[in-house]
Amino acid sequence: MGDPREKLIVCYECREPHSIIKTATSSLCPHCGTYISIKDHSINSLWNTSIRTRGNVRVEKKGSLNNLSVACNNLIIEGTFHSSADCQNDLIIRASGRITGKISCKKLLVEKKVEIECDQHITAEEVIIDGKLTGNITCTGNVTLHKKAVLVGNLKAKSMDLRDGASHQGSMQLG
């Protein structure tokens, strides 16, 4: 995939990656035939349908998703999110609250002054916490806790970068 006009997406069903043209709005997985939407979504009110896209999803300040599942490329949460998320890339949390569903992403970022509680397990390749996260994490790469960041919960990660003033309460398994 060296062509700058293409991007890589991962099928929701078989998890196989394939390249598509950046301007595409949908694709069929060449491995299993699943239809894959590439549409972006901006949620600014109560949303009542699960989302399956390899586009980006943004839950605006007035947006709310409850008891749904979201499969997307990148997810930005600025509103209420009581659902599950399967992100091909980044999950950025900019609003305090509670996430009731399972979280899976490439990179999880909890921004400064955000306090988030996760009821179910978080799986990520990289985790960066600049606020407070309560929940259990499995990270295949590095977990970074910035100055004044707090992680409350069990952590299993390859490595951890604990900056001055940051804290972790719970068990930790590194390596």
Image: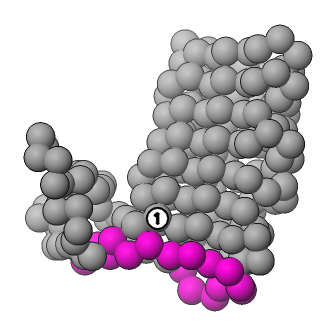
**Residue 46 inside the magenta-drawn segment:** yes
Q: Compared with residue 168, is residue 63 higher up or lower down, i.e. above or below?
A: below
Q: Depth check: 75 or 117 in front?
A: 75
Indicate the quadrant containing the C terminus: top left, top right, bottom left or bottom right: top right
Residue located 18% across and 73% down the image: 28
Residue located 63% across and 88% down the image: 48
Is residue 169 visible to the viewer in this orientation of the structure?
no
Q: Give the quadrant of residue 138.
A: top right
Q: Compared with residue 160, is residue 14 higher up or lower down, i.e. above or below?
A: below
Instruction: Look at label 1 and name its amino acid.
Output: Asn
Whether residue 66 sits left or right of residue 23 in the image: it is right
Helix, strand or loop at label 1? It is loop
Measured as percent of width and height from the top left, residue 140 is found at 50, 28
- Magenta residues span 35-50
Measured as percent of width and height from the top left, residue 85 is found at 57, 61
Q: Depth check: 45 or 29 in front?
A: 45
Q: Name the residue under label 1.
A: 56
Q: Give the quadrant of residue 171.
A: top right
